[in-house]
Image (cartoon, rainbow, N blue to C red):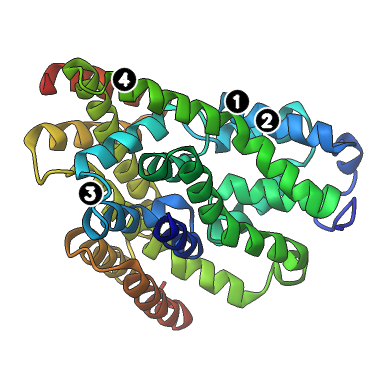
Amino acid sequence: MGSRFPKGWITGVSDSVHPPRSLAELFLGFLSIGARAFGGVLPWAHRTLVEERRWVTPADFAEMIALCQFLPGPNVANLSIVLGRRWFGLAGAIVGFLGLMALPFIWVLGLAILYADWATHPAVRAVVGGVGIAAAGLFIGTGMKLARPIARKPVAVLIIAGCFIAAGLLRVPLVIVLPAAAALALVASHTGAL
Amino acid sequence: MLALFLYFLLLSLLSVGGVNTVMPEMQRIVVETEAWMSGAEFTQLFALSQAAPGPNVLITSLVGWKVAGLAGAIIALAAFCGPAGALAYWVGGVWERFRDAPWRMRIQRALVPVTVGLVFAGGYVLATPEGIDWRNALIATASATVLYTTRLNPLWILSGGAIAGYFVYV
């Protein structure tokens, strides 16, 4: 079980932070993140954990999210596991994760069941199709935002283009693309080109 | 159902940076390798997972539900979150030790362009479920441009996509 007051907490701010006292409180906190997470979970996670419930400091939150983005797996699900573990060990990790996923899981299946009844309706198909393509556009826009800080580095642009062509246009399996691209990028990063 | 479970276990460990990184691979497996559904159906499931509140990882449970009902939905989500979650649990414990290590910074820097390239690839395969179509190109380009240039809540962009879809696809 992790320490209740781990290193990295800003001295003097820690007394304004109130970690959850029970598994039930932990569950309800993550439940309220999942319940409201329209248009992305991350902003709601920040609002709930840092601003409303004050379970973690802003700096601690940023650090934990960076860790979770660096690891494989869904970022906020990883966050629920890492923070749940910090406060209540394995039970906390499981309860935090289940709290986060419970309502979104029910809602997305409910929506899919509703959609299955209406999928033959041309207007419904058209609307859902439009949302899907717009969401694909959001992917591309997010990629552009992520690329902005590294767009002036020729090696970075080459790696971006290579991954796009291999995985998007040529449909090369990811078990080949990811290790190859990561190895090249690590060499570039080691020599200072990234 | 076993194939579903094994594929999503593998995807879990490849999903550095989140589920977005493995979207092109998930589409390739589901649509091309296993032919569980058409490209258009996959894009529609993706639309539902984006429109519902919650983590976008729920696309996995929609794929599972389509392949094997409720059990499939639970198995796909558990398979996708399991290995990565176990790793997060373990790393969360030792994180303090190597937080400022230079090698960790180097790995993080190296992974950014790889993730970006794969996110672009994911957007491309989702926007072209049946090959290149000018209506799809228009909606996807508009959506990407608005997201990049404004601070509008993405929910409004998705609503715009719904309205545009109604007018261009019916």
Q: Nearer the viewer, mark 4 or mark 3?
A: 4
Q: Residues within 10 Å of mark 4 (few under 14, many from 20)?
A: few
At mark 2, the secondary structure is: helix
Indicate which disc residue B126 carries.
none
Label 4 sits on a secondary structure element that is helix
Identified by mark 2, the residue type is Leu
Q: In the rendering, which numbered label is found on residue B124?
A: 3
Q: CA distance from mark 4 to mark 3?
A: 29 Å
Task: Name the side, left or right, on which A112 lies relative to B17.
Answer: left
Categorize mark 1 by other alpha carbons within 10 Å: few (<14), some (14-19), many (20+): some
Eye-nearest disc, 2 or 4? 4
Q: Amino acid at mark 1?
A: Ala
Image vertical order of residue B4 relative to residue B56, above or below: below
User: Looking at the picture, which amino acid does disc 3 mark?
Assistant: Tyr
The residue wearing badge 4 is A117
Q: Chain of mark 1?
A: A
Closer-to-camera residue (A181/A118): A118
Name the residue beneath numbered marker 2.
A31
